[in-house]
Amino acid sequence: MKNLKKYYKIKASPEDVYAAITNPFSIELWTGEKAEMSTIAGEEFSLFSGDISGRNLQFEENSKLIQEWYFGDQEAPSVVTITLSADRHATKIELLHTNIPDEAFDDICKGWDESYFGALKEFF
């Protein structure tokens, strides 16, 4: 298992970025894919037409999102923590993704850079 820690910056407010990653209608706008999402801890979610799925663990409005991502039958959960903070006219994003299966690590890294935060940057 591997861990990933990365930083991104998006030219939008933390409130707008938070809405874009938690509202299923907004997610569908910037991904172009079907999304199921709520801001209720314990509920399951699905992004990119089911390519990513898991369970929402915690939300701090406009500042943090914690999710468990499913990777088959692995024992230790894969946990994604996205932390947002204001930086002048932009939002600084810290991504921490733990317990990524070795065989999925390169694809996950590319997905964060291109499909997730890359698409989100283009959206704003």
Image (cartoon, grey):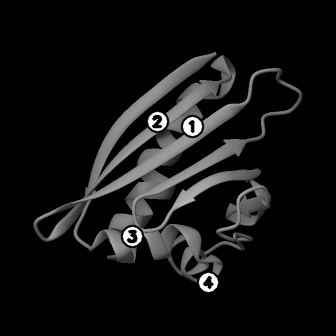
Q: Which of marks 3 and 2 is nearer the N terminus?
A: 3
The percent coordinates of residue 28 (x first, y second) are 61, 77
Residue at figure coordinates x 42%, y 42% from the top left: 95
The alpha-carbon separation of the residues under discs 4 and 2 comes to 25 Å
In the picture, which quadrant includes the N terminus? Answer: top right
Q: Which of marks 2 and 1 is nearer the N terminus?
A: 2
Label 3, on which residue?
17
Q: Earlier in the sequence, mark 1 or mark 3?
A: 3
Q: What amino acid is at disc 4?
A: Phe
The percent coordinates of residue 54 (x first, y second) are 76, 49
Which of the labelled discs sits on residue 108, or is there none? 1
The percent coordinates of residue 62 (x first, y second) are 41, 68
Residue at figure coordinates x 49%, y 56% from the top left: 116
Q: What amino acid is at disc 2?
A: Leu
Residue placed furthest toward the right? 73
**Does 52 appear above or below 47?**
above
Q: Helix, strand, or loop for circle 1?
A: helix
* Number of marks: 4
Which of the labelled discs sits on residue 96, or is there none? 2
Nearer to us: label 1 or label 3 = 3
Residue at figure coordinates x 48%, y 74% from the top left: 20
The alpha-carbon separation of the residues under discs 4 and 3 comes to 13 Å
Mark 4 and 2 residues: CB-CB less than 8 Å, in contact? no
Mark 4 and 3 residues: CB-CB less than 8 Å, in contact? no
Residue 24: which quarter of the image?
bottom right
Taking the image as shown, residue 25 lies to the left or right of residue 110, namely: right
Label 4, on which residue?
25
The alpha-carbon separation of the residues under discs 1 and 4 comes to 23 Å
Nearer to us: label 2 or label 1 = 2
Q: Which of marks 4 and 3 is nearer the N terminus?
A: 3
